[in-house]
Image (cartoon, coloured by chain):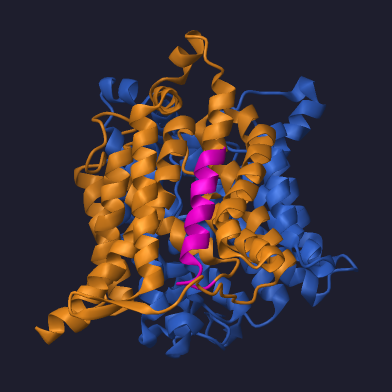
Chain colours: A blue, B orange
Amino acid sequence: MNKAPWGTRTFPWGALVVFAALAALPFTPFMSKYYLLLAFDALLFGAVAMSLDLLMGYTGLVSFGHAAFFGLGAYSTAVLLERGFESLWLCLALAAAVVGLYALLVAYFATTRRGIYFALLTLIFAEVVYTFFRYTQAFGGSDGIQGLPAPHLAPGVAMDTPLKIYYVVVVYLALAYVVCRVLVGSHFGRVLVAIRENEDRARFLGYRVQRYKMGVCVISALLTGLAGALYPGRAAYATPDLMHWSISGEFLIMVMIGGIGTLVGPVIGGAFFVLLQEKVSSYVQWYFIVIGLVLIVIVLFMPKGLLGLRRALRPASWRATT
Amino acid sequence: MDYLTVVLLPQLLHGLVFGAALGLLALGLTVIFGLLGVMNFAHGELYMLGAYAGIVVIGVTQSFWIALIAAPLLVAGLAVITEVTTLRPLYRREPLYGLILTFGLALVFREGARQIWSGDMRRILPPFTGSTPLLGMTYPNYRLFLLAISTLLLVAIWLFFTRTRAGIVVRAAVQDAEMLDGLGVNVSRVFTLTFAGSAALAALAGLLLAPVFTVYPQMGVEMILLAFIVVILGGMGSLGGSVIAAFVIGIAQSLLTLWMNPQRVAIAIFGLMIVVLVVRPRGFFGREGVFE
């Protein structure tokens, strides 16, 4: 088992170096606008996968409905931008409120059940949201809300270039990482792992298991929803396709590719998935076959994901994941 | 009275026909769930491949009837290869891995179909046309045939599971595979053959419904969610429950569209699901405590 993260462990230099490198990335010579936007996607979906890992890896709950949290965040921003409210902070606040309330509702019902039933409840709730947005003309129906202006960080400071929006996502990923890392190392996080390992025993020890599960569901949903709220800043649209259950499946894939229960792994997995999809699709049309095959190979031969690969290559640095 | 024969009765029959086909799909899904403990996300793709295999066979032989035999066999062959190479190594691992693996398989099959047959909508012509006067209305012959053959298949499957040794072995494997292994049955082979059988049923449903619906690579994605709902409603692992739930959902969906738009129908059915999952997760006929 790991020691508690910060406090007993030394300052996380590794994470600092990585984020410094990410901040310096735009100044490398080959970073065109195209690559900046690609990097935005990679980091944004990395952040989403990381928040899903809180549920999957640490609590043992498989959510098949995270696309709804992401999509609701995106729609919150889109609705505000469409109506002329351009403050990014306002967008984030609305996204937090909408996703938070919806997540409370979903978590309240879903956490009463375990395993496959939890997965199916989250899936069905998400399908309700998807169906609602897909057919409601006030939100653009199947076209969604298109052609949005750039959000403003402060009056007059528009996030209108790939460079600016890239830095927004780097900062977001850093903050989300700190939240997740602190959470996982806290007493709350330890209880989550106990629930994953043996829910009944955790209950008999006196923990109110359902409250812990609801808590982590809402936190994970909020982090995903806030990432969703940033998405229209880059894409200038929000469509119901963002909420389709196959997108929730892609989020699961990202976590699995990177390495479940590691936080860092899913970030890598999300980035890897985005880059793979973009790069393979520019060479061949059948990129989903490649992605499917990669997934199958990882499940069969590398159950610990890409991060597990690193550990396998350097057995000396192997540590049990929390 | 007119309303009854012109609107209500045809819609009720549509529901029955759809429910019977849905039952074929859900039966395979629930048996696989019992065996592997995972929802097979690739089941909808096997259903889709059944329709495409049908198109290929009809293209070669010009006969719908040969396709009805050959297409499920082709898909079952693919299922055997898939099961042995990908699912078998996962038996002893957590169900989560199986879930994700089938999701990957679904991606490969769906995209493979799109590459081979393109994404265009296709149709299979029904092997016979015309309609029959029935209870004061006329109903297409093919749909009546569909209802008859699906019902016949469901009865045959019921007989298989209750009256044959092979069927009893499969049910035993669903309940306790380890025990069955201890009794000297080759469990791996049972799993492989059951997977193939469930794939053949899905393929058959796909081909049978193809003349009524359209054939396209995404067709399984829409059906699979409904099939999941049927399996939960019936009680996971319960064969009879799945069939009854399939008829309930088929008829409910078809009747509700008379009074609501499709969006509200979908939301109503999802709402029903949430209530069932929260209040009685074992569905109509699931055993208490199983998978809860």
**In the foreground, A285 or B75:** B75
B130 falls in the magenta region: no
User: Which span is picked out in magenta?
Assistant: B196-214
Relative to A64, is B280 above or below? above
Relative to B155, is B262 above or below? below
Which residue appears at 23% of the width and 30% of the height?
Answer: B288
Which residue appears at 29% of the width and 80% of the height?
Answer: B261
Q: Main secondary structure of the magenta part?
A: helix
* Quadrant location of the C terminus of chain B in the rendered image: top left
Q: Can residue A31 be seen in this view?
A: yes
Relative to B154, is B142 above or below? below
**In the foreground, B230 or A211:** B230
Figure disc tally: 0
Which residue appears at 72% of the width and 32% of the height?
Answer: A301
Query: Horizontally, is B44 left or right of A216 in the view?
Result: right
Which residue appears at 56% of the width and 75% of the height?
Answer: B123
**In the foreground, B32 or A46:** B32
* Quadrant location of the N terminus of chain B in the rendered image: bottom left
